[in-house]
Amino acid sequence: MTQRKLKVLVVDDDDTMRDILEMRLRKWGFDVVLAGHAREAVELADRLAPELVVSDVVMPEMSGLELIRELKGADPNRPVILITAHGTVEMAVEAIKSGAVDFLTKPLNYSNLKAVLDQACRDHDLLLRSRRLSSDLESDTGFGVFTGQSPQMREVYELIEGLAESEASVLIHGESGTGKELVARTIHELSARSKGPFIAVNAAAIPRELMESEVFGHERGAFTGAIEEGIGCFELADGGTLFLDEISEMPLQLQPKLLRVLDEARFRRVGGAREISVDTRTLSATNRDPRESVRQGQLREDLYYRLNVLSLYLPPLRERDGDVPLLAQHFLELFGRKHGISSPAIRDETMGMLERYRWPGNVREFRNIIERATILARGDWIEPPHLPPYIRRPDDRPPEELVVTPGFTAAEVEKHLILQTLDETGDNKAETARRLGLNVKTIRNKLKAYGIDR
């Protein structure tokens, strides 16, 4: 018995066949509507909106293949199953191309028909779930650019609103890919400084020898190559908000100067004698435990306390209870529009894999995987093969355990470690480089040397 009493439209010009199908389908728990020809079927479909259609192929006036095109024009998602006593491979191919979910030949194997109908019912329920999620996205299920209604994220939304009302420094911490810069931008946009500039600086992305000039600016002639004065990020953010990302990567020798700016709102450019005053609110972020960075001597304790007047922890995706389906629907619709295709729906098995995976790259990794699956599915169902192999694995362990024993060369161990880390990060080369303490260019060069295109 099907779990839901769905309405099935049976179309066949053979009275006996219609009666047999009606008897079988009612026994299986369906609500059955009968049509003796395709024109009648179109009229009944418009009036009664059946969820499923079972139709003969060879009928007078209009064939089952033509009927599919008529019905799909009104409802592209309505499943149509074709049956015929004169089946050929060419006809089956044409039926599937026209949009039939299956093509069965007479005499019918009713066990097969039951299995096809049951799958169609499951697909119908998945489409309903997808529509409900779309409806949820239009209601209060997020906060600005954020999508999610888990208790963990609702707490984040409340904190953002409270932090936006303050002028104090905020330290945002959370794993890579959780959206720390989005939090900072949202705090800025909700604050009284929203009409001022928002300047973001990633301390991990700037060469250390250029960091002081990037943050504080420099005077003409301050160093070789300084042919004109340079305005630093504090000046650029005057009247607005400065976001210092990966603050633990800030060179230790610059941290006292940063602390002074935060305390006194004044600084000197590199090579300058004149003090410059700024009115800037500073937000900072780190993907490490900031207290551990203090203990390891990467972040000065006095600077930590100055940055951490207020703090916000952004939870990783694996801790956001129930947010994966809603996020998936959000990205499906986003990438459907971006690539000009209809938004696919996700099979239950595929969704289970997405929910079980630990997402070391968090929302950034999740977004990339959903875009990949959307492109591969091309508006159809997202199936397990549309996901990378490391997500389809039934357990949560890395694809291979790295065991180093005598006999391996250093180059072999390095290659194994790079490839395993790429697997764990979803081929995110920047995150792989960060974890391994390398730069992205090195990772790309290594892959090229291995002859691997990922």
Image (cartoon, rainbow, N blue to C red):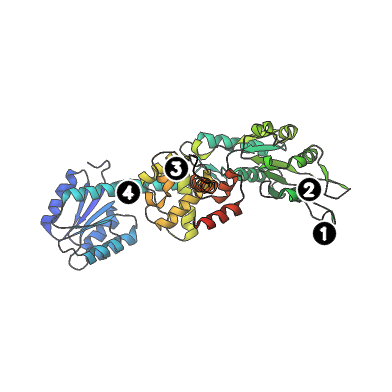
Whether residues under marks 4 and 2 lie with C-beta atoms below 8 angstroms apart, the answer is no
Q: Which residue is mark 2?
A: 216
Amino acid type, label 3: Glu
Which residue ends up furthest to the front in the rendered image?
407
Front-lying residue, 388 or 267: 388
Label 1, label 4: how many angstroms apart (C-alpha)? 64 Å
Q: Which residue is mark 3?
A: 400
Residue in view at x 71 percent, y 45 percent: 241
What is the tally of numbered marks visible in this picture? 4
Q: Which residue is mark 1?
A: 228
Mark carried by residue 123: 4
Helix or strand or loop: what does disc 4 sit on?
Answer: helix
Q: Earlier in the sequence, mark 3 or mark 2?
A: 2
Amino acid type, label 4: Asp
Q: Residue 108 location, x and y as percent?
A: 15, 54
Whether residues under marks 3 and 4 lie with C-beta atoms below 8 angstroms apart, the answer is no
Give the quadrant of the N terminus: top left
Mark carried by residue 388: none
